[in-house]
Image: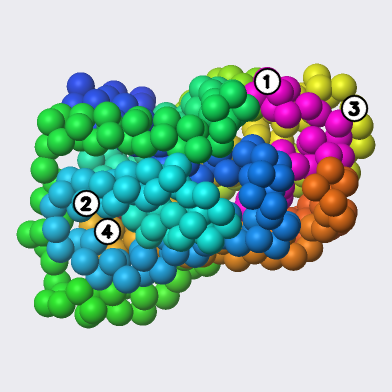
Amino acid sequence: MSQPTTPTIAAEQPLKKFTPYQVLIIVILAFLQFTIILDFMIISPLGDLLMKELDLGTAQFGSVVSIYAISAGVSGILTAGFADKFDRKKLLLFFYSGFLIGTISCGLAWDYHTLLIARLITGVFGGVVGSISMAIITDIFSFQQRGRVMGFVQMAFAGSQILGVPIGIVLANHWGWHSTFFMVAGLVFIIGIVVIFRMQPLTGHLAIQRDKTPIQHLWHTIQKKDYRIGFLATAMVSMGGFMIMPFTSAFLVNNVGILQEELPIIFFSTGIASMVIMPVVGRLSDRLDKFKIFAIGSLIASIMVVIYTNLTPVPIWVVIFINIILFMGIMSRMVPATALNSAVPEPYDRGAYMSINSSLQQMAGGFAALFAGFIVVQETKTSPLQHFNWLGYTMLGFVALTVFLVYRMSELVKRKIAAHKPT
């Protein structure tokens, strides 16, 4: 008698093609994520300028970065109970409109306190947009398609580095850092119009709701043990990833000797490489075991982060090469982990699960940035950063922990597939 086979997450059949409407949704969500990621990421390369022009200390700058993430997390928790109670398109437009207002407010800020408030507003709305996008992906695409979808949508990360961040830095160098936020706001407005006219309503989840009130729905989602594994895995992945990001530009300028005008070259080169790497990682995640891809990416990221955080003055091509390998490791963690997490919730919990998941991701990243702001020290505005390598060593511990947690999440998803439950 033949032995039962172990369930696997790898696709055992030819990859299912996307329909024209699915392609449209991928494009819309990729551009939407582009603006969300760009708005958050632009703070890091503008860090050296902001710290000098607004006279910010490292702890204050860490607060500016973290307030976005923490406010996004709190907002996501508060709205999680409502996430499955409305048409996802209407919910997306509501929060994307608030994100637009927050981004414009950032461009109008004139000191530490006004910028802090503007970032808080942006986070309250922007953080929820990501979770709604994830719920939309899970509604429209099968599990066997999601690795590729995540790969394409996460290309927004590369796109922000290829176009958004370099252009933003150039604008900041010529017309002031305010102009960068106005550029982002213009893009948000255009993409919002496209969503209004091209995206169809998403209401299928409304027919399978089980809880009468949003509070009950939120509580029942949090109570589920399997969901908590996904929540914890997401938080730890984010905690490690956010540790060094806020101070990368200040580190490169003041420790490695990179000129402010050379930063766009570094971000552009890294983005081009990521644009090639992420679709490959997405396809591998659909064809091979997602956890194995994640584990390999974690090993690469661990090695490169130690090298990166201990850099001394080197030529710019060395920085670019190290950056590319580092982001290859990071992307090889992000894509499969996100695809696995999308399979954890049941259809009637997806909106709430994604909101809570996104909230924990944002809050964990926010606390990591806040922690980094207190660890890193800079005596004067042009002095080298001290203790930056401490953050790299701390990241190694989080990476090791996430490998264990994502393994547990992978086994959970395999059991669901073996039981033929919908994902």
Which of marks 3 and 4 precedes in the sequence?
A: 3
Residue kind at label 1, given as amino acid type: Ile
Task: Say few, some or many: other residues with alpha carbon within 10 Å of mark 3 (under 14 / 14 to 19 / 20 or more).
Answer: few
Q: Residue at x 15, y 36 (%)?
A: 196
Which of marks 2 and 3 precedes in the sequence?
A: 2
Q: Secondary structure at mark 1?
A: helix
Q: 363 left or right of 84? A: right
Task: Say few, some or many: other residues with alpha carbon within 10 Å of mark 1 (under 14 / 14 to 19 / 20 or more).
Answer: some
Q: Secondary structure at mark 2?
A: helix
Which of marks 2 and 4 precedes in the sequence?
A: 2
Q: Which mark is residue 314?
A: 3
Q: Position of residue 207 (x, y in %)?
A: 7, 59
Q: Secondary structure at mark 4?
A: helix
Q: Alpha carbon of mark 4 to alpha carbon of mark 3: how far?
A: 47 Å
Does residue 256 appear anywhere in the picture? yes
Residue stretch in magenta = 238-265
Q: Alpha carbon of mark 1 to alpha carbon of mark 4: how far?
A: 39 Å
Q: Secondary structure at mark 3?
A: loop
Q: Which mark is residue 2?
A: none
Q: Alpha carbon of mark 3 to alpha carbon of mark 2: how far?
A: 47 Å
Residue named by callout 1: 265
Q: Are marks 1 and 2 in contact (CB under 8 Å)?
A: no
Q: Are marks 1 and 3 in contact (CB under 8 Å)?
A: no
Residue named by callout 4: 351
- Is label 4 or label 3 in front? 3
Query: Majority secondary structure of the magenta segment?
Result: helix
Which of marks 3 and 1 precedes in the sequence?
A: 1
Residue kind at label 4, given as amino acid type: Gly
Q: Which mark is residue 94?
A: 2
